[in-house]
Image (spheres, rainbow, N blue to C red):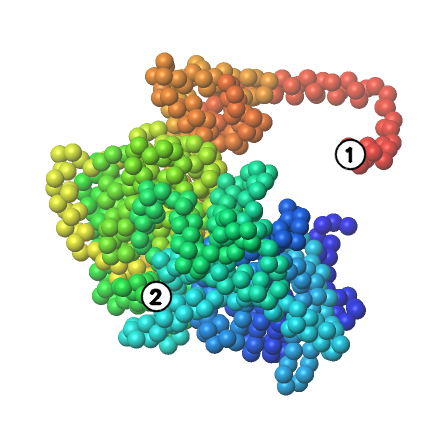
Amino acid sequence: MTDSDLKKIHIVFNGQDTPPLKISQLFDANKFNRLTAVTGNVTADFINQYLSRFIKVEVALSSPENYEAKTGDEVITKVALTNALLSAANKKPAKVFEALTSDNQANVLNNLFQVAIAPTQAIHSRFYLLSNSETHDTRVILGSLNLDSASFDKERNQYEEILVFDDDIRLFQNLDNHYKNDIKPVLRPFFTENLLNAAQNQIDESLKDTKGTKNAVVILDNEVTDQIAAADMTDLISHDVQKQIDENKIPAMITKSMRDITTNRSQDKEEAERQIQQHDTIYTLQKTAVSPRAAKPKLKSREKIFKQVQDALISGMTPQQRSAEKKYTTFLYDRPMERNLVNNNSGLYVPNDTGTHPIQFGKIATISQIRDGLKSIDAVLKGYQQYVVDYNDDYGKRFYEAILYSFTAPFLWEIRAKASLNPEDGNDIPNFLILGATAGSGKSTLLRIINQLTWNTDRSLIDFGTIYPTDTPQKKAKTVDAIEHYMKLGSSYPVLMDEIEPYFFQQDQYSRHLVVDTMNELVNNPHAIAPLIGTTNYDSGFTMLRETARRTYYLQIDKVIDDQQKGEANKYIYNVRQTLNNTLFKDFVMRMASLLEDDETPWRAFDEKTGKLDFLANTRKIFRDYYQMADMEVPSYFADEICDDFKESSRNRWAKLYLTQEEDFKYRQQDHSLLFDISKLNTFNGFTADSIEKYRNALPIELCVDGINGKRGKFVEIKADEFFKWIGERNPYAEEIEENEASNDETLTTNTAEKVTESPVKEQKKGFWARLFG
């Protein structure tokens, strides 16, 4: 039996094996109108898709198992209370609430949908009770599943048991009583009063706004959610723990366990650094919440605990780190579930001018406005055409391609999900655009132009080198951490990063951490992570690790503005930038939203020449339609395909190396390969200090004998035929190979003729193992 034949989602319906059921059939909102669930996890997507039509929903979230907790008191302090505090500190309730549709947010505010947690009890139960208050139909679901799509993914290597019992009144009543009498009394709201008050206040503000919508959506900013987290954590300790003590649901001396919680912490130090910091913060908070010297430990006052919570939340951050976090200020939220094209809602939201609530972003433009937008882009390209040395239309496509990418950026995570047949396909839609450019090529100006065309300002740029001061300890690692923070704030607007230093791309601990890990996260769990559009110095030596290059869209802008015309060029581009606005971008997001809503839209368009997925194909279509609507010719610099500049740059690097160092490439006749001593690329021979890694990274693995092993060590071994085809040079060893093959053919013919004259040898019959393994 193969893995695909295994039944990983095992459904038993009233004692009988059942073929796979759809989630909507299992949680049937047509037959039942009420749901009570005790589950390990619930996601906003699951609520939005499958629970919206229930009249009443109650969900109790259980605690993850923790094998370190050995006593009953440790289960309370190290499992239940710690997880509750971590959930609040990580703002999980706010994130789930924000991801709900506006209708479901209203259901929560109206107390129709309730989610709860047990802050002092560990719950591992899993059961689901469905009922209908009019027909009195009931359903009990037991098993290992959670209220998330992962539990129903048959491709996931995870077994799930689902036992369904319809109209088993005794079983339903038993579990219903257990929930009401045993579980519900130890629960507290997951969506706390602090969160709901903030949400209601934002809705009230939104309804006052003339630009607001009838169904106002709640998106809380970081400052508000910080305040909610601090208040929730304070309430968990000062109210919930004390209440459970007063009601004798937990032992009174639990406060001593809280005070002693940091004892024997050394065993946990092998955990990931971030997780250790989070746990230490929570543990310290628990400890300091109890009077330190009292014979019978008791909790401190609410005011003291609140102050300690605030201090704990910022204790792990230096003033420099807090300053670095504030450098990113541009927010554009993509909310596909709110998309409503009839009401001109693209699904994108921005904070209003005062930052109190989100408002819709996007507006259909007039033909005249579209024409003006296209003319503005044309004026930008004419500037480069006029003042860049050796400009041609193929070079101009790089600038246009960067603009197309920036327009598409807010929707890349949606396009990735629609275009990927397999998870790894998501790497074909990179979340990183890098403009490799020489000094004086206008790359920073292009970044500002992109900012103006999409955001109507040029002030959203972040300078890579100044995120942290020069003398900051571990500046490189902290800089990359800050960029990751910017990208994961929930916004879809690209992080615009100027002058990214070469080490970021060349050193594994930086580019792999950010580019590779971020793309893997997006591939395995599609959600909005802001793309990064950055510039870096090309200086004829730029390189990337192969894993980074695979997940990055690289455009090379290696021609400079004519020094003699620099003053005139600066004046020209300054005047052009005064005319730029984001009217065309606002129209574009409406049209792209329409394509995303249309199930007939093709997302898997492949370039015939390169075979690469053109993830900008629909963007190109929209812009071609723009030119047709505006009655304008499609310009000659319009990009019709993905540019593969990193591949071309790598090819050119090795071609020059071979032509200038031909004697160092030693032909190995036995394997038809070339051996090259890569250690010769040193400073003594006129190369830069990092040239070895640059050339190693630029050499495609498929050209190397024995794959990645062919790139390692002192000697690089390269397949001769493939290498010469790649660099576009004649293979000087091809004639020698042909002569040897002809000689071999002649010898083979002679030997065959001789064998024919001999008596034939009877072929031996092959045994079982020989047939099976050859």
What residue is shown with label 1? 773
Quarter of the figure with residue 473? top left
Q: Looking at the image, is 555 positioned above or below residue 671?
A: below
Residue 434 screen position, x and y as percent = 36, 42
Residue type, mark 1 in image: Phe
Q: In this rendering, which labeled residue sits more in front, label 1 or label 2?
A: 2
* Residue drawn at 50 percent across, 18 percent down: 714
The quarter of the image holding the C terminus is top right
In the image: residue 176, left or right of residue 225: right
Residue 226 screen position, x and y as percent = 39, 57
Residue furthest to the bottom: 134
Q: Earlier in the sequence, mark 1 or mark 2?
A: 2
* Residue drawn at 55 percent across, 44 percent down: 262
Numbered tag placed on residue 358 in the rendering: 2
Marks 1/2 in contact by CB < 8 Å: the verdict is: no
Residue furthest to the front: 295
In the image: residue 651, left or right of residue 41: left
In the image: residue 609, left or right of residue 37: left
Badge 1 crowding class, 10 Å Cα cut-off, few under 14, some 14 to 19, many 20 or more, is few
* Residue drawn at 77 percent across, 17 percent down: 754
Q: Is residue 755 visible?
A: yes
Q: Is residue 642 visible?
A: no
Q: Secondary structure at mark 1?
A: helix
Q: Looking at the image, is 538 positioned above or below residue 486?
A: above
Identify which residue, 324 or 180, lies in the foreground: 180
Q: Looking at the image, is 137 positioned above or below residue 429?
A: below
* Residue drawn at 34 percent across, 46 percent down: 322
Identify which residue, 129 or 164, lies in the foreground: 129
Residue 5 screen position, x and y as percent = 73, 54
Numbered tag placed on residue 48 in the rendering: none
Residue 265 screen position, x and y as percent = 57, 41
